[in-house]
Image (cartoon, helix red, strand yellow):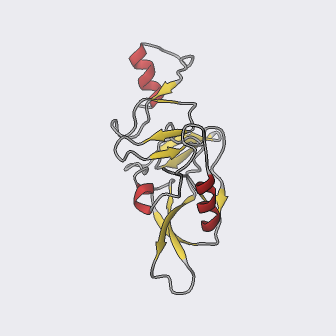
Amino acid sequence: MTARSRLRAALGLTGAAAVAATARADAPADQYNLFNMTVETIQDARTSLVWQRFRYSSPPQLSFQAAAAYCATFSIPTYPTGWRVPSYKELLTLIDESPHIEWSTGAPVLTAIDGSAFPGTVADADYWTSSLYARAPLTPTAYAVNFGDGSAKLDALGNALYVRCVR
């Protein structure tokens, strides 16, 4: 059941006309508190991390170094400083244990992240972590996470991947 369906049921509403400014994510019930759909951040109740959301756009695609610079200078009025690229373990906390189907650009897409909590996420794409792979002998690499199936991989630092900032 989606967050919108749960909200409709809780309010006793039927049909597609029910619209709310707040919602619950489809992640585990205790992961995110009730949140405003229009805000630029969401806090994970389990880790206390505050995550950047992309309400009206997709995250930027940047090299590893450019992603670090982007997050270091990211600022919003409620949290003007303290943003960074998440570690591998931190980014994995956003992965849904069971990937599910969500509608994106008019088609069903397999996704392993909560679309209500993190709108604008490009599901079948890699996102940078700040965790470097120490055993890369020739090409410096870092861990990346894919929100399509929840997999992890290594990417060369010069590749352009998506980034989501955390604080």
Q: How many marks?
A: 0
Q: Is residue 121 above or below residue 32?
A: below
Farthest-out residue, top:
12
Q: Is residue 107 above or below residue 68?
A: above
Farthest-out residue, front:
81
Left or right: 108, with 88 as reference point = right
Q: Which quadrant of the figure has residue 91?
A: bottom left
Residue 102 placement (x, y as % from top left): 52, 41
Residue 113 seen: yes
Which quarter of the rendered picture does the N terminus lie within?
top left
Residue 161 seen: no
Residue 66 placement (x, y as % from top left): 65, 63
Residue 8 placement (x, y as % from top left): 45, 19
Residue at 46 percent of width and 64 percent of height:
152
Left or right: 146, with 98 as reference point = right
63 or 48, nearer to the observer: 48
Residue 114 placement (x, y as % from top left): 47, 42
